[in-house]
């Protein structure tokens, strides 16, 4: 879900290169700066894939030792005029897996996105792995089942996903330790995935000059978002934060990696010193000025189904619904 409109071009994928937290001689540095050799301080390799149409950054996060990997917030390209999906962005991720001989374990969704369609199901079919999202997706499913008057068979218990994460749950990617932090506010189901010293924050925070995610969708709450951000700000100052979108205010190349320290010092909406009341007032005022994301209706209908299309009708075609005068 986006906080500002995009200046989209032709969907070129920008490859920012792999960010490894390893140093030149293979000894990694933990967040306290000491040499590491225990699994508790293993750090991931992170590769970002930027989709200029939606301003979304998808990530491949991998264990450099075991080559086990996860994909965070993948994008299924969507031509809204023709209602046609394409897999150019997802195929770039598949190629990266092949090139690096990675083994896929998880498709991690930070939330049910309203600005792009998820390629998790397509990528699961290509690479394997399990599709996961926060357990509160059930709230989002129930809300939009009502808004869209979906078919009675549409389940609102998250059963479309392979796994539903709860707050504080831990898991592994290879030998990397990962922990789930529930960070609601942008949506009720938003998660941050903390993997080693690296956090994938979804739309909870953007780059410091872009601020924070909007809170005006059903179930959004700026007060909750503020409190979620305080949870992230309590992480080690050196924690690397990877955001889900970037919309360059200056029109320059997109950026997507920052740190807790940088956000606490510079985030235009929520740097240290901004009170909860100030943040809530800012967020309400700003959200009133924002148009709905162009792809909110197709995106939610696909993403709530873990990337599946609605069941085909008797002519073999899947259809999406558009509620008139209802959003
Ligand atoms: Fe979002």
Image: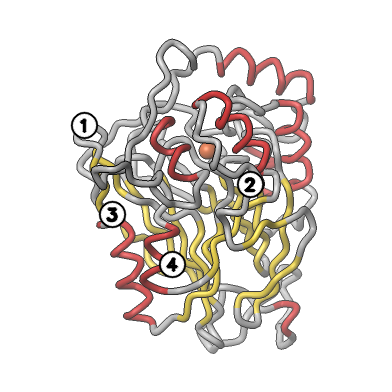
Question: Disc 1 marks which residue?
Answer: 81
Which of the marked residues, 4 or 2, is nearer the chain's N terminus? 4
Q: CA distance from mark 4 to mark 2?
A: 35 Å
Residue 314 picture location, percent across and down: 29, 43
Q: Quadrant of residue 249?
A: top left
For marks 3 and 1, give the one nearer the viewer: 1
Query: Left of 41 or right of it: where is 294?
Result: left
Front residue (pair 186, 65)? 186
| Dot 3: element | strand
- Point out which mark residue 124 bears: 4
Query: Left of 290 or right of it: where is 250?
Result: left
Q: Would you call the spot at circle 3 few (<14 residues within 10 Å), some (14-19), or many (20 or more)?
A: some
Q: Answer whether labels 3 and 2 touch (C-beta < 8 Å).
A: no
Residue 131 picture location, percent across and down: 54, 61
Question: Disc 3 marks which residue?
Answer: 13
Which of the marked residues, 3 or 4, is nearer the chain's N terminus? 3
Tell me if the residue at label 3 has its CB under 8 Å from ligand 1: no
Which of the marked residues, 1 or 2, is nearer the chain's N terminus? 1
Q: CA distance from mark 3 to mark 2?
A: 26 Å
The residue positioned 53% from the left and 48% from the top of the image is 243
The residue positioned 41% from the left and 74% from the top of the image is 127
Q: Would you call the spot at circle 1 few (<14 residues within 10 Å), some (14-19), or many (20 or more)?
A: few
Q: Would you call the spot at circle 4 few (<14 residues within 10 Å), some (14-19), or many (20 or more)?
A: some
Which of the marked residues, 3 or 2, is nearer the chain's N terminus? 3
Question: Disc 2 marks which residue?
Answer: 262
Residue 316 picture location, percent across and down: 26, 47
Which of the marked residues, 4 or 1, is nearer the chain's N terminus? 1
Query: Left of 60 or right of it: where is 16?
Result: left
| Dot 2: element | helix
């Amino acid at each position: 879900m986006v906080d500002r409109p995009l200046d989209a071009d032709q969907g070129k994928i920008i490859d920012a290169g792999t960010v490894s937290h390893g140093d030149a001689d293979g000894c990694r540095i933990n967040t306290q700066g000491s040499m590491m050799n225990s699994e508790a301080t293993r750090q991931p390799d992170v590769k970002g894939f930027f989709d200029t149409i939606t301003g979304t950054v998808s990530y491949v996060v991998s264990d450099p030792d075991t080559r086990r990997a996860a994909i965070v917030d993948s994008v299924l390209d969507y031509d809204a005029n023709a209602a046609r999906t394409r897999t150019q962005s997802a195929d770039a991720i598949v190629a990266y897996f092949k090139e690096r001989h990675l083994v896929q374990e998880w498709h991690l969704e930070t939330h049910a996105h309203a600005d792009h369609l998820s390629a998790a199901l397509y990528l699961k079919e290509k690479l394997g792995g399990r599709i996961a999202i926060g357990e509160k997706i059930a709230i989002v499913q129930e809300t939009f089942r009502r808004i869209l008057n979906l078919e009675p068979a549409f389940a609102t218990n998250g059963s479309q996903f392979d796994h539903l994460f709860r707050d504080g749950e831990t898991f592994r990617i290879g030998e990397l330790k990962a922990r789930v932090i529930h960070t609601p506010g942008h949506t009720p189901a938003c998660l941050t995935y903390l993997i080693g010293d690296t956090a994938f924050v979804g739309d909870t925070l953007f780059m410091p000059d872009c601020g924070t995610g909007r809170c005006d969708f059903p179930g959004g709450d700026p007060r909750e978002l503020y409190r979620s951000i305080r949870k992230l700000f309590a992480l080690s100052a050196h924690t690397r934060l990877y955001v889900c979108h970037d919309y360059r205010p200056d029109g320059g190349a997109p950026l997507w990696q920052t740190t807790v320290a940088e956000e606490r010092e510079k985030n235009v909406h929520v740097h240290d010193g901004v009170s909860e009341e100030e943040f809530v007032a800012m967020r309400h005022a700003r959200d009133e000025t924002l148009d709905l994301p162009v792809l909110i209706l197709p995106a939610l209908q696909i993403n709530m189904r873990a990337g599946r299309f609605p069941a085909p009708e008797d002519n073999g075609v899947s259809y999406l619904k558009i509620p008139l005068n209802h959003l």
